[in-house]
């Protein structure tokens, strides 16, 4: 097969592997013109120092021995299958790099024969880049399910970032859609190997490890996802978890879900994840409705604030940085600006808050400015009936955590 055809097939099939939230890649300006973020071939990712770089995202092969129901590359999917040679792919990447098309590589793959052999071949591609071409740029290497610690260690010397896709939050859910994969042995064990490598040698996998979960494909709820995410952040030290709303790309009749999952649900999960990682929220504090899902009508921080009205209103001139972050409409930047401003002045008006980036329509019901309340007294009456006073429950279910302890 001609290299251009391979390129088309193997970049198109790689687009479902996520390395940036969908919020970064959506555009309302249509697909024409220039400057569009490409959905295949090139993706964008952020380095630990905050730079946005373009990555050549490609599969080594779209052949796979597994039959994960949601996956376009699964064994029983009747599609054209192909494979790059290791040198062919390394040469191609270097040509793209030298022409400034891309700045780094995101290498993933289906499983050809077995995980071990395919991973060896992926590592070979990177060895050619690092040792023959002396490529020093960013490489994200996907780890295949069940790969041995020895091979993970080999990849860890070469790659900046590594990841293995968890896909589902629990063993039972994984069995439904990826019958050949063993949750603990094939997915959690490689994650723990990477954690150990990173802990013992800071030069290995310097940009850390991440994972991805497909949202909605196994009929799981958000509480299951967030509980597992919290465990992964606490116990495996993941630096990011990506949530990818399920898109039906197969005609698999035994999939528990047939319809695409809404991007709003995906976005709510990213918001809840952000609250845990950046705003100091414990996963037990996150609000779920009676189906175990995050409310769609309110972002999780607003829903938490509504459930915790006894903690409000908060005096803007006295609150700590952590307390400011709990106020809807105040983010990290505006909280830092408030703290800075307060060193020299008292904040006296809504206008001042607006000027430093506070979203007043969200914050106004939860704050005091020099003891004065500007919110609406009817707020509680308006909002609580919409949510259903008892329909939001803080997450107290820690039982799932037992799966890997
Ligand atoms: S192992 Fe990976 S590539 Fe193969 S079918 Fe499952 S998700 Fe797709």
Image: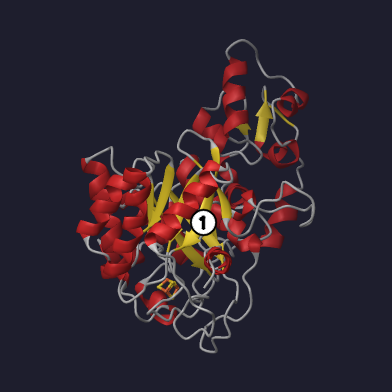
- Residue at which label 1 appears: 57
Outermost front residue: 2
Q: Quadrant of residue 147?
A: bottom left
Image coordinates for residue 235, horizontal then vertical, percent: 30, 52
Image coordinates for residue 78, horizontal then vertical, percent: 53, 85
Closest to the observer, 81 or 350: 81
In the displayed structure, does residue 14 sit left or right of residue 67? right
Residue drawn where x is 61% and y is 23% of the image: 337
Position of 290 relative to 100 (above/below): below
Closest to the observer, 349 or 401: 401
Q: Quadrant of residue 372?
A: top right
Residue drawn where x is 63% and y is 73% of the image: 260
Q: For the residue labelled by badge 1, is the local secondary structure a helix, a strand or a loop?
A: strand
Closest to the observer, 165 or 91: 91
The answer to whether residue 44 is seen in the rendering is yes
In the displayed structure, does residue 382 sit left or right of residue 131? right
Residue drawn where x is 50% and y is 61% of the image: 17
Image coordinates for residue 106, horizontal then vertical, percent: 46, 53
């Amino acid at each position: 097969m001609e290299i251009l055809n391979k390129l088309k097939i193997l970049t198109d099939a790689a687009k479902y592997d996520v390395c940036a939230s969908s919020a970064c890649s959506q555009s309302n300006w249509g697909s024409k013109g220039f400057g569009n973020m490409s959905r295949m071939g090139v993706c964008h990712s952020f380095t630990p120092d905050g730079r946005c770089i373009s990555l050549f995202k490609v599969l080594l092969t779209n052949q796979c021995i597994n039959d994960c129901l949601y996956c376009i590359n699964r064994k029983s999917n009747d599609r054209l299958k192909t494979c790059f040679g290791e040198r062919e792919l390394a040469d191609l990447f270097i040509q793209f790099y030298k022409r400034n098309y891309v700045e780094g590589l995101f290498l993933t793959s289906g499983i050809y024969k077995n995980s071990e052999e395919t991973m060896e071949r992926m590592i070979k591609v990177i060895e050619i880049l690092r040792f023959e071409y002396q490529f020093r740029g960013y490489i994200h290497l996907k780890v295949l399910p069940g790969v041995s610690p020895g091979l993970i260690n080999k990849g860890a010397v070469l790659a900046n970032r590594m990841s293995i896709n968890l896909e589902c939050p629990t063993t039972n859910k994984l069995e439904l859609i990826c019958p050949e994969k063993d949750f603990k042995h094939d997915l959690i064990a490689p994650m723990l190997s990477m954690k150990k490598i990173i802990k013992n040698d800071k030069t290995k996998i310097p940009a850390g490890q991440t994972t991805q979960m497909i949202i909605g494909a196994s009929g799981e709820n958000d509480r299951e996802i967030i509980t597992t995410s919290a465990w992964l952040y606490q116990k495996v030290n993941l630096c990011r978890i990506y949530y990818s709303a399920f898109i039906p790309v197969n005609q698999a009749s035994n999939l528990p879900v047939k319809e695409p999952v809404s991007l709003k649900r995906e976005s709510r999960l990213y918001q809840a994840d952000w609250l845990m990682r950046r705003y100091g929220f414990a996963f037990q504090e996150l609000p779920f409705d009676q189906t175990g899902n995050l409310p769609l009508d309110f972002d999780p921080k607003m829903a938490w604030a509504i459930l915790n009205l006894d903690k409000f209103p908060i005096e803007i001139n006295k609150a700590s940085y952590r307390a400011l972050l709990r106020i809807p409409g105040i983010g990290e930047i505006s909280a830092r600006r408030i703290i800075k401003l307060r060193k020299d002045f008292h904040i006296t008006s809504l206008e001042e808050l607006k000027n430093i980036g506070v979203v007043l329509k969200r914050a106004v019901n939860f704050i005091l400015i020099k003891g004065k309340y500007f919110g609406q007294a009817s707020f509680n009456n308006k909002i609580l009936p919409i949510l259903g006073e008892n329909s939001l429950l803080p997450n107290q279910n820690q039982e799932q955590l037992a799966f890997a302890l």
